[in-house]
Image (spheres, rainbow, N blue to C red):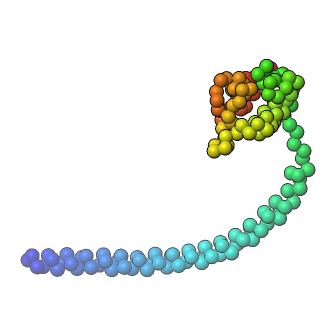
Amino acid sequence: MAKATKKAAAKKAAPKKAAAKKAAPAKKAAAKKAAPAKKAAKKAAPAKKAAPKKAAKKAAPKKAAKKRTPNAAFMAPLTPSAALADVIGAKPASRPDITKKIWDYIKKNKLQDSTNKRMINADAKLKTLFGGKNQISMFDLAKIVSANVK
């Protein structure tokens, strides 16, 4: 009887395998049908890309026509402190002008560090401006300017 149940179990398993094999070709057919749709989508895509390029060329001249105006807060003249006046002069100047004058002084006296260009070495005048530090980062320069203007 044990042999009979094994044969019956084998017969029951066989139809399941056949059903699985029948389902697999259906999936392949569906995949083949989807592939031509992708090719059609690729053909349509280049036509869409060409249209925005033409529109972008027309929009570019409009941007060039606008004039950029500086922020009034940056252009307001500020009075430098005594330590800053030793470096740039006592005349009131705007924040960008003060920064330019400090950089002119740094480059004229070759105070930018040769190995790490982001660092500024201090001489006697800059040491008082930098709060006694021998070297500062260029990113700290804006902080120092803000602390030394009125």
Q: Is residue 89 visible?
A: yes
Query: Which image quadrant: the C terminus?
Result: top right
Q: What residue is at 49 percent from the left and 79 percent from the top?
A: 29
The x and y percentages for residue 19 are 35, 77
Number of residue marks: 0
Q: Quadrant of residue 50?
A: bottom right
The x and y percentages for residue 52 are 78, 63
Q: Quadrant of residue 51?
A: bottom right
Q: What residue is at 86 percent from the left and 28 percent from the top?
A: 93
- Residue 138's place in the image compared with 78, above or below, is below
Q: Is residue 74 visible?
A: no
The x and y percentages for residue 86 are 80, 24
Q: Nearer the viewer, residue 52 or 117?
A: 117
Q: What residue is at 82 percent from the left and 28 percent from the top?
A: 88
Left/right placement of residue 1 relative to residue 135 reads left
Q: Nearer the viewer, residue 135 or 61?
A: 135
Q: Nearer the viewer, residue 67 or 79?
A: 79
Q: What residue is at 35 percent from the left and 76 percent from the top?
A: 20
Left/right placement of residue 50 relative to residue 15 reads right
Q: Nearer the viewer, residue 37 or 127?
A: 127
- Residue 20's place in the image compared with 69, above or below, is below
Q: Quadrant of residue 49?
A: bottom right
- Residue 132's place in the image compared with 15, above or below, is above
Query: Which image quadrant: the N terminus?
Result: bottom left
The x and y percentages for residue 53 are 79, 64
